[in-house]
Image (cartoon, rainbow, N blue to C red):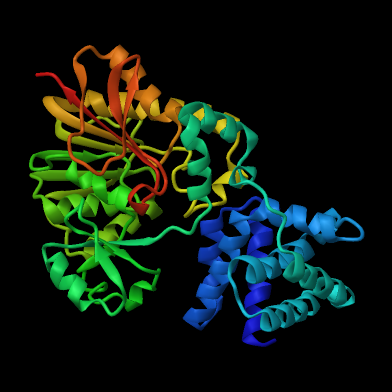
Amino acid sequence: MSDGVDARVLAARIVHAVVFDGRSLKAVLNESLPSMRDSRDRALVEAMVMAVIRNRVAYQQTIDRMMPRPLGKRDADLRALLYIGIAQLHDMGLAAHASLATTVDAARAIGRAHQANMVNAVLRRVQREGVLPLPSSSEWPPFLVEMIRRDWGELADMVFEQSALQAPMFLRVNPRFISRDEYLASLPMDAVAVPEFEHAIELSEAVSVHDLPGFAEGHVSVQDLSAQATAYLVNASGDVLDACAAPGGKTAALLETQSPNKLIALDNNARRLKQIEETLQRLKLLGPNVSLQVADSRTIRFDHSFDTVVLDVPCSATGVVRRQPDVLLHRRREDIDALVEMQHRILLNGYAQLKPGGTLLYCTCSILRVENANQIATFLGLHPDAECVEIERTGYGIACTNDGKYVGHQRLPGDLHADGFFYALIRKRA
């Protein structure tokens, strides 16, 4: 097979694994992409797959309308390949002749030679007629559409539209090595400083980390703006507990800009904790004041309390659909209830280990009130010694209230071009 055919076959297999086998997009990409030796082929495969997952329902209905006979369950591999073909023609703007030829050849390569002419016919019809126009909300499970419309009203359609777009690439400059202005001057690609956050840069298009000057030396990291913004909200000069720390970006951002007396980073998975260690090693941030521990943040107790607790809790990930579009394939209504209960337990345990006068930062990459504003309101009702401190700094989205009381800030997807994210600062009264 040619490299072009190989790329289409691999992309179709990844789509099959995610859409029809229910596997995690991130996990399958991590397993599959290394088999492509050329970085350009890896980027092409990932782009094709992401386009399919973002537009799966529209592609599915388009194929069903154009097929003389509906595809059966045994044709999932063929359907996945047709999705890949449509992505190239409709959303990626690749050259039509090459896209058609390689996708038809890929049909032969997966053992569908007898249907190669049908693949060619369907894709040529897509080329002429386009993809069935559907609202962005059609890609979302109905229960999430209902929740987002209830939570955000007239802003809901904007949420769906922004979530269907490709996310930009943000960088976080490590000020221990280089200033943002100096790093911007060193970049060989178009980029701009983000004025709201001192160390943030937005690239005009995504690139490999290997193309970023000083990446291996720890001068810069890739991190969405919303996640970077957490480090600006807390004073981390004392004892700090980062209780849901993986993959380590927020831990690193705190250590780059502040000097904690002691920082303990937790995760309940040893493999993810190793990722944190590798990140901190690259950034030259490991030291005697940093401790990494495998632990369950719902139950772990320490023999001392902390000045600052950071909780980036597990959530529905509804704010990062641009980056993780398979969330919309895998998320179920019952997942939300389980996540809310887990978040509540983590919040209770984290707060129990906060010193009087200390500050807890609760954050999620969700846009659902039940995980965010309502979660904080419930917590405050149980803890009369807790107060939600209003975020006065600009760049954190919309102020949220519950029964007239401030309960945090919510960024919706696309605000400052960033991911959806929730922030709440809770102070324990002395």
* Res 21 seen here: no
Q: Is residue 95 left or right of residue 215?
A: right
Indicate the position of residue 300 as horizontal and vertical percent values: 30, 32
Rendered image quadrant of residue 223: bottom left
Indicate the position of residue 345 as horizontal and vertical percent values: 37, 25
At x 72% / y 76%, what residue is drawn?
A: 103
> Of all residues shown, which one is farthest toward the bottom?
2
Instruction: Indicate whether 259 appears above or below 220.
Output: above
Viewer-proximal residue among 386 and 356? 386
State the count of labels: 0
Viewer-proximal residue among 292 and 74? 74
Rendered image quadrant of residue 395: top left
* Res 167 seen here: yes
Q: Is residue 293 left or right of residue 207?
A: left
At x 48% / y 53%, what residue is drawn?
A: 322
Q: Is residue 429 left or right of residue 60?
A: left
Instruction: Indicate whether 63 appears above or below 400.
Output: below
Indicate the position of residue 212 as horizontal and vertical percent values: 29, 75
At x 84% / y 72%, what residue is drawn?
A: 121
Instruction: Name the quadrant of the C terminus.
Output: top left
Indicate the position of residue 28 as horizontal and vertical percent values: 57, 61
Q: Is residue 350 left or right of residue 287?
A: right
Viewer-proximal residue among 73 and 303? 73
